[in-house]
Image (cartoon, rainbow, N blue to C red):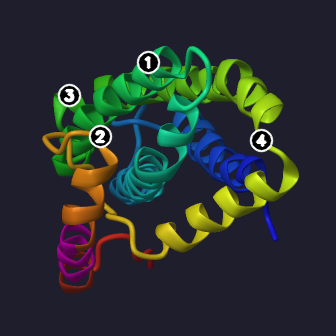
């Protein structure tokens, strides 16, 4: 049974790998061919999907537990503020063609902000949570995250407040709509 730190660590590793690939990849300005730009768009879509799921389950399950810590409100407020800012960027990025002038500016912003947010969680939040949770609590929270990811939205919803009650009420409908749109458009499928 994976604990919360294992689940989130796997998510972070996946996101860091996508960020690294985007950073190393050729852009339009770097002379990328049409197939390379298509692959760049596919990487962005994979990042948007991974981040959307990750942030939704954190907002519903992880940050409320962090809020229960002494000083946890400040930690959670900063973390959810970073995630809301990322959702705005990811939402815009998801809608752009890689040939658009703003595409690479937004890719650079999400690379910088994504790495900063991961470091914030791992270096500032996780140590505090580790001190608070016993292994059983860490395992239970990890399983909640795993289960929630299966039905989480695959697109950012920057206008939805990051509150657990709102997410529990509207999240399943948003996720269903996202997955239907993905199936119809082939979004997130490579090849």
Q: Return the residue at label 3.
A: 102
Dot 2, how many residues are within 10 Å of its Cα: few (below 14), some (14-19), or many (20+)? many
Which circle's residue, 1 or 4, is located before the other in the chain?
A: 1
Quadrant of the image for the N terminus? bottom right
Horizontal side, residue 190 vs residue 177: left or right: right
Dot in front, 1 or 4: 4
Give the x, y percent position of residue 140. Answer: 70, 62
Dot 4, how many residues are within 10 Å of its Cα: few (below 14), some (14-19), or many (20+)? some
- Under circle 3, the secondary element is helix
Which circle's residue, 2 or 4, is located before the other in the chain?
A: 4
Which circle's residue, 3 or 1, is located before the other in the chain?
A: 1
Give the x, y percent position of residue 141. Answer: 65, 57
Distance CA(mark 1)–CA(mark 4): 21 Å
Q: What stretch is highlighted in magenta?
A: 173-181
Distance CA(mark 2)–CA(mark 3): 26 Å
Name the residue at 68% across, 18% down: 124
Q: Is residue 130 magenta?
A: no
Dot in front, 2 or 3: 2
Distance CA(mark 3)–CA(mark 1): 26 Å
Distance CA(mark 4)–CA(mark 3): 43 Å
Front-lying residue, 42 or 184: 184
Q: Return the residue at label 2.
A: 162
Give the x, y percent position of residue 79. Answer: 46, 25
Dot 3, how many residues are within 10 Å of its Cα: few (below 14), some (14-19), or many (20+)? few
Q: Return the residue at label 1.
A: 78
């Amino acid at each position: 049974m994976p604990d919360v730190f294992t689940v989130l660590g796997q998510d972070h590793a996946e996101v860091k790998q996508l960020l690294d690939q985007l950073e190393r990849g050729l852009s339009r300005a770097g002379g990328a061919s049409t197939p390379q730009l298509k692959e760049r768009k596919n990487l962005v879509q994979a990042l948007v999907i991974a981040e959307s799921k990750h942030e939704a389950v954190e907002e519903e399950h992880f940050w409320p537990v962090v809020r229960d810590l002494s000083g946890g409100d400040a930690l959670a407020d900063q973390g959810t503020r970073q995630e809301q800012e990322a959702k705005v960027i990811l939402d815009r990025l998801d809608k752009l063609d890689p040939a658009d002038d703003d595409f690479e500016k937004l890719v650079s912003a999400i690379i910088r902000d994504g790495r900063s947010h991961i470091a914030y969680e791992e270096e500032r939040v996780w140590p505090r949570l580790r001190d608070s949770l016993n292994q059983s609590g860490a395992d239970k929270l990890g399983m909640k995250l795993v289960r929630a990811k299966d039905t989480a939205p695959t697109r950012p919803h920057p206008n939805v407040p990051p509150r657990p009650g709102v997410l529990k009420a509207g999240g399943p409908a948003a996720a269903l709509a996202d997955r239907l749109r993905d199936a119809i458009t082939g979004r997130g499928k490579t090849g």
